[in-house]
Amino acid sequence: MRTGSIIRLFQAGLVAACAQLMAVALATLLVFLAARSGLIAPTLAEICPNAEASPSSVSPMLTWVYLLTAIGIALTSGRFVDFTAAHIRRASRLMRPVEPDHATKALLVQLWLTAIGFAILVLRPPPHLWIEAGRYFGGACAASIAWSAVMSIGLACFGANAHAARKAF
């Protein structure tokens, strides 16, 4: 398979990942601006309280915003999802003409399990190595926020591809 063909199989996920990246950037900016101006209850200190002692205590509100926007983006239908579904359907039928939906079903299960794994990781604190890397570069709090953000981007990517695989039936 050519590289362009493979990208077509995952185009919905790539578009969803880009959309989630923009949503994460916007949500993070809005939460920090709202907290700084006092529009929402948590202050900046409450968003990342005592980052040296507890760097994994990212604002639950920010984590849930990342999670919910990723789920929303993953479940959104559009032309990229339809395009990806058509390519998944075609590739699945080429792989096993006798049982044309077999590869699609296998792909669907794998993508959903991966998306669920990313959803769990969004809600969990970052690994110790991630926190230590953040401390090394001067931002344990930023590393904790970045963990949730990156995991939500993975959720959006794999969730959108799973959505496309589901539509491929």
Image: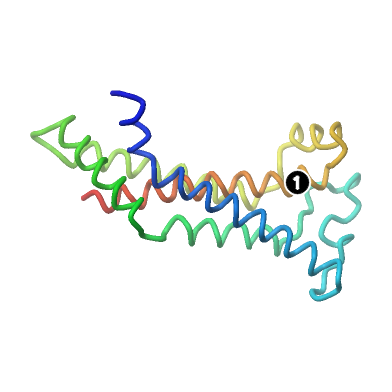
**Kind of element beneath mark 1:** helix
Extreme residue in the left direction: 98
- The amino acid on which the numbered mark 1 sits, given as a three-letter code, is Ser
Render colour scheme: rainbow
Q: Quadrant of residue 75?
A: bottom left
Which quarter of the figure is the N terminus placed in?
A: top left
For disc 1, the marked residue is 144
In the rendered image, the vertical position of residue 32 relative to residue 12, given as above or below: below
Give the number of callouts. Answer: 1
Picture coordinates of residue 147 (x, y %)?
Answer: 68, 44
Mark 1 surroundings: few (<14), some (14-19) or many (≥20) residues within 10 A:
many
Between 144 and 32, which is closer to the camera in this rendering?
A: 32
Q: Residue drawn at (64%, 53%), measured in percent from left and top?
A: 123
Q: Going by the image, does 98 lie left or right of 123?
A: left
Position of residue 99 measured from the top left corner of the image (x, y, whole percent): 12, 37
Farthest top residue?
1
Q: Up-down: is 34 above or below 63? A: below
Residue at figure coordinates x 26%, y 43% from the top left: 105
4 to the left or right of 19: left
Please tell me in which quadrant of the rendered image residue 140 appears. top right
Indicate left or right for 75 with 153 as reference: left
Q: Residue 35 appears at what percent x and percent y?
A: 82, 67
**Residue 21 x/y as whole percent:** 59, 49
Instruction: Tell me what residue is drawn at x 15 percent, y 36 percent.
Output: 93
Q: Nearer the viewer, residue 109 or 39?
A: 39
Q: Residue at horizontal 60%, vertical 53%?
A: 22
